[in-house]
Image (spheres, grey):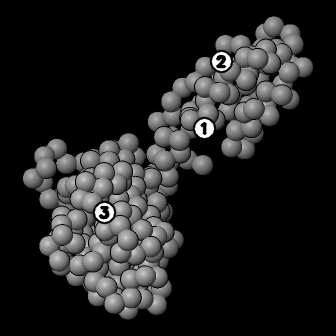
Amino acid sequence: MLRIAVPNKGSLSGPAAEMLHEAGYQQRRESKELRIVDPENDVEFFYLRPRDIAIYVSSGQLDIGITGRDLLIDSGANAEEILPLGFARSTFRYATKPGTAGGVGDLNGMTVATSYEGIVAKHLADNGIDASVVHLDGAVETAIELGVAEVIADVVETGTSLRNAGLEIIGEPIMKSEAVVIRRTGADPEEPKVQQFLRRLQGVLVARTYVMMDYDCRVEQLEKAVALTPGLESPTVSPLHNEGWVAVRAMVPAKEAQRIMDDLYEIGARAILTTAIHACRL
């Protein structure tokens, strides 16, 4: 039975459960449940603190897990990313009072406060910076005002909370994070149950990204139409009862669907429809 770690709370929890449900797996009905078994899919789910998941996976007690890339790197655990999932995206940045520093190269001799000590220490070392790192569990914006540090490093979304604290973002992003599937470093990459799990999640990712588009067009416009809707391999083309017309079906990127429909209509395509894709295998 495949043993999988899933975030039990926070910004990772809800989207992870939704994706797993779309992939056909049972999920817990109550937030108090810490473990459920999905016998039909031969999977056991463990609901753990997101920060702890990489540790559990690296121990070999659990086969794979879903956590944040930032949490994986910060943990220093013997685990690796095997599939990005596209949700819970965030950017990790340095910030300080205006005029203190312009980038990471100016941080020598300074103290940096953060909740992600592992990430920051590695980034500073990679850039040859000799700076101290202070670990705080939250609200790092106040560290500068209270004299604990000259610089902070934290997840930045809009930057509003930093500006409200009188701070400015400096330098390039330390890293960009998102939810990822992880496994123990050195684990068999071809393990069948793991590969099946990854295929299911990849199917959900594709289904969320693409829609199926169907339309009719005249044969003489087919090449132009196919150029607009090449599909993943190539579109399906079928003759219609009315001579000179064909029906075309192809997967198209969802974010481009409306523009493609307009372009198809302009070249004479009609009966243009899009339908959602709920699951797929490529």
Q: Earlier in the sequence, mark 3 or mark 1?
A: 3
Q: Residue furthest left?
A: 32
Residue 95 seen by the camera: no
Observer-nearest residue: 249 or 70?
A: 70
Q: Position of residue 222 (x, y in %)?
A: 84, 25
Q: CA distance from mark 3 to mark 2?
A: 51 Å
Task: Give the residue drawn at x 60%, y 38%.
Answer: 253
Label 3 sits on a secondary structure element that is: loop
Q: Which mark is on residue 253?
A: 1
Look at mark 2 in the image and give the residue it sits on.
Answer: 272
Label 2 sits on a secondary structure element that is: strand
Q: CA distance from mark 3 to mark 1?
A: 39 Å
Q: Position of residue 171 (x, y in %)?
A: 46, 70
Using residue 241 as the reference point, say whether residue 186 is left or right of it: left
Using residue 16 as the reference point, say whether residue 83 is left or right of it: right
Q: Which mark is on residue 167?
A: 3
Q: Earlier in the sequence, mark 3 or mark 2?
A: 3
Q: Position of residue 209 (x, y in %)?
A: 53, 41
Q: Is residue 73 above or below residue 46?
A: below
